[in-house]
Image: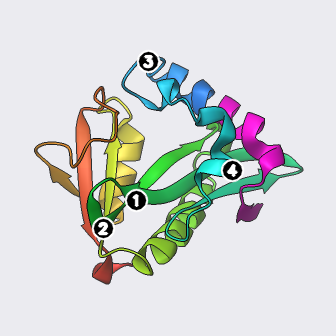
Amino acid sequence: MHLRVLEERDNPHIETIIRTCLKEFGGDREGLAWADPQLGRLSEVYQMENSKYWVIEHDGKIVGGCGIGPVAEMDDVGELQKMYCLPEARGTGIAHELMVTALDFASKHYSKCYIETLSNMEAANQFYKKYGFVALDKPLGNTGHFSCDVWYLKTLTDIG
């Protein structure tokens, strides 16, 4: 397994992974990453100093990824974005490696990290709680993902 920063050549692969995972959980609809107009060009999106996207490569194949980006109008809050792994990569430690890398990066740019997801992604929800994310009653900001029904926030001084 090799973790690295997303490159332009990875765009179609990570888009396929995100769409595959969203379909698996009924997330192939408006108000979720599925409908993001920039989904096919993530390497362009994550170019700002306070944002980055990583992929995990296994035997030459991209099997997962996640990013950190800003939350509009909230300078001190970064968002864990588009964290998805193919089914064959789950339970292998890949998600841990992605999370630790993302939180380390986020802590250099933000004081808090936000996540929004779906309640039926049960394993992901448990995973976020394991890393100290605390459930919120409502979403932060306006990410355009109005179909998400679970939101979390983590103070980044307590990474671990």
Q: Which residues are magenta?
A: 1-17
| Mark 2 to mark 3 CA distance (whole Å) | 32 Å
Q: Is residue 158 left or right of residue 23?
A: left
Q: Quadrant of residue 10?
A: top right
**Front in this rendered view, residue 79 or 154:** 79
Q: Quadrant of residue 93?
A: bottom right
Residue 119 placement (x, y as % from top left): 29, 33
Q: Check if residue 16 falls in the magenta segment.
A: yes
Q: Nearer the viewer, mark 3 or mark 4?
A: 4
Numbered mark located on residue 80 in the image = none
Name the image quarter holding the C terminus: bottom left
Write down the residue under mark 3.
Answer: 26
Q: Check if residue 85 falls in the magenta segment.
A: no
User: Are discs 1 and 3 less than 8 Å apart at CB?
Assistant: no
| N-term-proximal mark, 4 vs 2 | 4
| N-term-proximal mark, 2 vs 3 | 3
Q: Nearer the viewer, mark 1 or mark 3?
A: 1
Residue 10 higher or lower than 32, as above or below: below
Write down the residue under mark 1.
Answer: 70
Numbered mark located on residue 43 in the image = 4
| Mark 4 to mark 2 CA distance (whole Å) | 22 Å
In the rendered structure, which amino acid carries the disc numbered 3?
Gly
Residue 7 higher or lower than 4, as above or below: above
Residue 26 higher or lower than 123, as above or below: above
User: Are discs 1 and 2 less than 8 Å apart at CB?
Assistant: yes
Numbered mark located on residue 75 in the image = 2
Q: Nearer the viewer, mark 2 or mark 3?
A: 2
**Residue shown at 10% from the left, 44% from the top:** 137
